[in-house]
Amino acid sequence: MDIFKRLSEYQAESERLAWTGTFKEYTEHLRKDPSPAMTAHARVYEMIESYGVEDVGGYKSYKFFEQEIFGLDRAVEKLVEEYFHSAARRLDVRKRILLLMGPVSGGKSTIVTMLKKGLERFSRTERGAVYAIKGCPMHEDPLHLIPHELRPEIEKELGVRIEGNLCPSCQMRLQSEYGANIENVLVERVFISEDNRVGIGTFSPSDPKSQDIADLTGSIDFSTITEFGSESDPRAYRFDGELNKANRGLMEFQEMLKCDEKFLWNLLSLTQEGNFKAGRFALISADELIIAHTNESEYKSFISNKKNEALQSRMIVMPIPYNLKVSEEEKIYAKLISHSDMRHIHIAPHALKAAAIFSILTRLKETKKQGMDLVKKMRLYDGQEVEGFKEADLKEMQNEYVEEGMSGIDPRYVINRISSALIKQDMQCINALDVLRALKDGLDQHPSITKDERERYLNFISIARKEYDGLAKKEIQKAFVYSFEESARTLFENYLDNIESYCNWAKIKDPLTGEEMDPDERLMRSIEEQIGVSENAKKAFREEILIRISSYSRKGKKFDFTSHERLREAVEKKLFADLKDIVKITTSTKTPDESQLKRINEVTKRLIDEHLYCPVCANELLRYVGSLLNR
């Protein structure tokens, strides 16, 4: 019953939003709110802006894209600011075709699909409302009814801009149905819909011999020619081409550069002048954002042909590279898996991360910056701290190669290999090793990988395995340390006492004997070295900890084991190193005694309760880390 209730509510909402009135009533509406008269480009930009914008890492992050597009903040910001924003302000870029160019499976089609769906939703809001001449096959802007001579005066009065002419159909109907009485012409609210062919057109190239230009511009209705007597009579013409139906919204050209030339010639006039030729009529006005997408090889082939210069000059090319952040790549795989029917199979923590590490490594280019290898670069790109490098180094590397991210392993390949691992019937859970094994097996089947690339990729799989090994040890380390929680806190407090004495040039008192001693340098360094704090950096690190303690104290908060992430990591690693022999024995023994079994159960429970493992992958992790420690 809830389903039918929701359907009923949706229908009621559509009826509430519906509006029909005369042109005179429509102009009164425009006096109060001129937004319905905005251009198609402005409508797209307003729709994106309506979701909100926030500043992330020096770039504008548009919330509209964040559910589907990951790791492309820079590319998306450039797309929105340099094209959509400028075009919305009627700058000359609106007279250009927007061409998204990038590698396969990089998100080009997803961006276009999101824009189409977003426009559909936006047209159902007050801000995004679209009004059209009732019965017009092109859902035409009602303001086209106003004669050119009167437009400057009416534009000033209503606070709008009027561009374009009536379509042939509306010109005839204005005379035949309304007796040239403009104020009585009926206007209705329309909702942009790809399914209903309102405000969205899509053109996909097929066999040029069989595909007709009528797919774009409409065609003669031969069944009515005998009735109306002429091919130039609008009633004998179907204004049902994709360019006709995309009016007021968005026109998508899929794999545009694969289109036959005759289909692209119409775009020369449409982009520059806002009109196109169809049948035996004068130029037909159309207000639509033209967006196309293609891959890099097709684009290079296109620009190398001198015959394409006129069309090329009418394009704004926006590179859409692959994502270069490991954490964002994980989200891509998680999203794709969530759309499948395999959600019942548990995916162990770090399994998708291992795949993401491999993918990102294949896309990165070696930097000339000294001391920076691909793994460090990968971490820096992902927002992690890398000793010896700052944010300025990150920006320098991001600008070092314009083409970085335009090549490498695509997400489709990776998700195909993850799917291969997921589909095995006996699997209750897959872990990082299962995923990496599937990636390795798939390299032999990849059609476009050369022998040299295969060797490189196998090396990246090995690096991903090493990264996972470190993560696995850290998970066990945390789980074991918490089973020795008292020991961890004692070590933590001991370290704080020692650095306080060190920074204040004071002695430390032995808690048992009361004897005053110098701060224990060996203890402090044994902890700091766990997170790579160098001898030269130790003083600054210790002072930073004291400043943090003082800050917490002023705010009336207690500085504890969880207050400083790097210090906590250092203490955990130090304690883990001290407990290594216990961990080795506990994780690798086949017949654990009572105390070992108790500890295994404690660690397994913590992995399941706090680290999202299931019983299967928690036990596999214990065994795997045990084998690593015993090597």
Image (spheres, grey):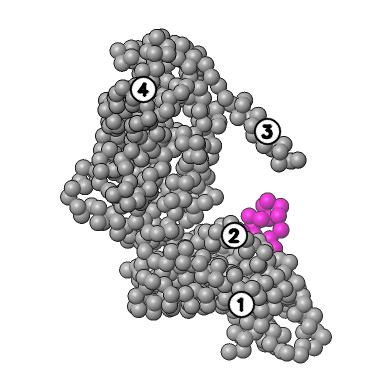
Please tell me how crowded label 3 is: few (under 14), some (14-19), or many (20+) other residues with Cα within 10 Å. few
Mark 4 neighbour density, 10 Å: few (under 14) some (14–19) many (20 or more): few
Q: Amino acid at mark 3?
A: Glu
| Residue at disc 4, secondary structure | helix
User: Which one is in front in this view, the residue at disc 3 or the one at disc 4?
Assistant: 4
Residue 144, image x, y percentages: 37, 20
The residue positioned 42% from the left and 31% from the top of the image is 248
At label 2, which amino acid type do we have?
Answer: Ser
- Mark 1 or 3: in front is 3
Residue at mark 1 to residue at mark 4: CA–CA distance: 82 Å
In the depicted structure, whether residue 54 falls above or below residue 71:
above
Pinpoint residue 158: horizontal percent, then vertical percent: 42, 16
**Residue ID for mark 1:** 473
First to last magenta residue range? 546-560
The answer to whether 117 is drawn above or below residue 439 in the figure is: above
Q: Please give the label number shown on residue 227.
A: 4
As rendered, which of 160 and 489 lies closer to the eye? Answer: 160
**Which residue extends farthest left?**
306
- Look at mark 3 in the image and give the residue it sits on: 9
Q: Residue 443 placed where, x, y %? A: 44, 75
Circle number at residue 340: 2
Is residue 165 found left or right of 193 in the rendered image?
A: left
> Which amino acid, by three-letter code, is at mark 4?
Glu
Q: Secondary structure at mark 2?
A: loop
Quarter of image, res 513: bottom right
The answer to whether residue 73 is visible is no
Task: Tell which circle, 2 or 3, labels the residue nearer the N-terminal end.
Answer: 3
Q: Are marks 2 and 3 in contact (CB under 8 Å)?
A: no
